[in-house]
Amino acid sequence: GVMELGESAETTAIREIKEETGLDVKVNHLIGVYTNYFAQYANGDRAQTIVFAFHCTILGGELSADRKETFDLAFFDPKEAPRLFSQDHRDLLEDGIAGRIGVFR
């Protein structure tokens, strides 16, 4: 998701998770900041992305895809991630599972 003006990274994470999954979460800690990934948009523009990965606890809500940015949601065994996710998602998931805090890549 994209940060709104004046919003903290933590608040952005909480809001984006709610909007895209229907879940209410509490941020426990920062896993890491990831800066070496790139996105390409439909118009051909490329951008370097900055990803803040947080370890969160689900407090409530109902799992529901927003159908705009999220088309399907599921919980799965982390061992399945290497074949499901892109490299940037695999990196942050690996760091989270390993219990790393404050990673910077």
Image (cartoon, helix red, strand yellow):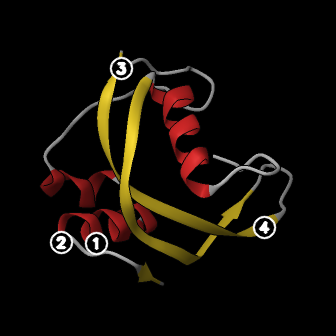
Which element carries disc 4, helix, strand or loop? strand
Which element carries disc 2, helix, strand or loop? loop
Eye-nearest disc, 2 or 4 = 2
Q: Name the image quarter holding residue 25.
A: top left
Q: Say which of 87 and 28 sits in front.
A: 28
Kindly report the distance in space between the C-alpha atoms of the residues bearing marks 1 and 4.
26 Å
Q: Is residue 40 above or below residue 56?
A: below
Residue 78: which disc?
none
Residue 95: which disc?
1
Q: What's the residue at 58%, 35% (across, down)?
A: 15
Q: Earlier in the sequence, mark 2 or mark 3?
A: 3
Eye-nearest disc, 1 or 4 = 1
Q: What's the residue at 52%, 63% (across, down)?
A: 52
Which element carries disc 1, helix, strand or loop? helix
Residue beneath label 4, please?
46
Marks 3 & 4, CB-CB < 8 Å contact: no
